[in-house]
Amino acid sequence: MRREHIDYHEILNVSKGATGDEIKKAYRKLAFQYHPDRNPGDKEAEDTFKRINEAYEVLGDTEKRHRYEQFGTVDDMGSPFDFGFHGNFDTVFNDLFTDFFGGQQGQRARKGDDLRYNLTVEFEEAVFGGEKEIEIPKEERCTVCKGSRIEPGHEPIICKNCGGRGQVRQSHGFFTINRTCEFCGGEGHVIKHPCKACKGRGSVKTKKKLKIKIPAGVDNGTRLKLRGEGIQQHGDTIPGDLYIVLQVKEHALFERAGDDIAVQIDVGFPLLCLGGEITIPTIEGETLIKVPAGTQPGKVFRLKGLGVTKSTGYGRGDQLVYLNIVIPTILNETQRTLMEGLAQEFAEASPKSRKGFKEKFMDIFD
Ligand SMILES: [Zn+2]
Ligand SMILES: [Zn+2]
């Protein structure tokens, strides 16, 4: 089956009798305008770019062009799609544009700067995760000139000083050195008509609202990376990344200990002696714990699974309950009487324990 006739001349907007240079120039101009890097996410521009490349693959090649102009198709030589642009357009693009952008610069993907945003989250948000909306400053590619910095309808002018190379050679006796062209600043071209919308910067300052998903279990210093939300300035083929650095607010009751949550509870010493139940705050609400009679100071109660989601995403840490024994500093009359009676009772029940330091010391030498 023969392919439908495609008018490559029309795609490149050149006449049938156009010279090789004219075709090359026309291709450059269009490819410059429709290159995917300049039109991120624009499907239509991408398709146009493909068609431009297809046309140039044929018209830019003397033999293929000859066949095409003679037979109106290049089918005899296979589909034009087989000429090699299932691969990388950038190869042919970059070859042609080297003199545009000057030397090495234009050939490699250049990534924009990364942004850092310090975000404070509540203790509970760090434990359970959540969502926050932030506003970041953004350099966005100018939509009027598509980042080219040139007022639409005009073209960059190849720098006369360096011939578009961006560099100039200087001979010093035996050797030559390459210097960045001072005239165009290494760009290889000069702009006579800068874009009015962005004042020739290629980008405009804006603000962008972003919803940040905070995963459960984050901690102080956790960095979240948002790819492509960083800065993209003129000459950056891809934007940098955005790093959200988290700061977790302190909580009045809870404290992080890795994946565990620690809590200190004030209790009177009679509770430890006699045992009983106390109400403990947890991150999920209050709970009762049983304190056995005779509990010693320093005892830690562990509430399984009431901690923070582990960084692996599986399971949770525990809540650790530290009982903080409070010794009253002031006693009322009744308390004093009772306490004295109690002290007396303990002394009589276990006279040895009432030994003074001196007696204990002497015991060692018995
Ligand atoms: Zn602009
Ligand atoms: Zn120059």
Image (cartoon, rainbow, N blue to C red):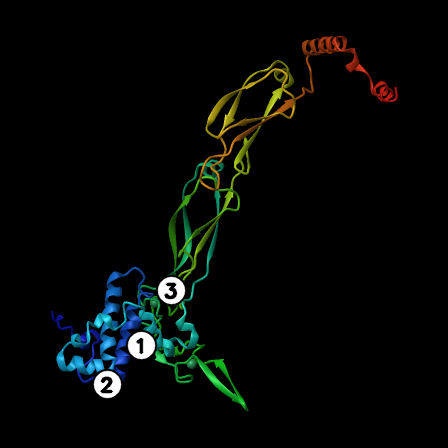
What distance separates the C-alpha of mark 1 from that of mark 3? 18 Å
Mark 3 C-beta to ligand 1 under 8 Å: yes
Residue 19 disc label = 2
Q: Is residue 96 left or right of residue 285?
A: left
On the image, the x and y values in percent for residue 222 come to 50, 46
Relative placement, left or right, of 282 versus 79 is right
Q: Residue at the spot x=68%, y=9% of the render?
A: 334
The residue shown at (40%, 62%) is 232
Looking at the rendering, in which quadrant would you find the C terminus?
A: top right
Q: Is residue 225 above or below residue 108?
A: above
**Residue occupying image coordinates x 24% and y 65%:** 47
* Eye-nearest disc, 2 or 3: 2
Location of residue 62 in the rendering, given as x and y in whole percent from the top left corner: 24, 83
Residue 134: image location, x then y, percent? 41, 48
| Category of crowding for the residue at label 3, using alpha-carbon neighbours closer than 10 angstroms: few (below 14), some (14–19), many (at least 20) | many
The tag on residue 155 is 1
Q: Nearer the viewer, residue 49 or 191?
A: 49
Q: At label 3, which amino acid type do we have? A: Ser
Queried on whether the Cβ of the residue with tag 1 lies below 8 angstroms from ligand 1, the answer reads no
Q: Which mark is residue 203?
A: 3
Q: Residue furthest left?
A: 1
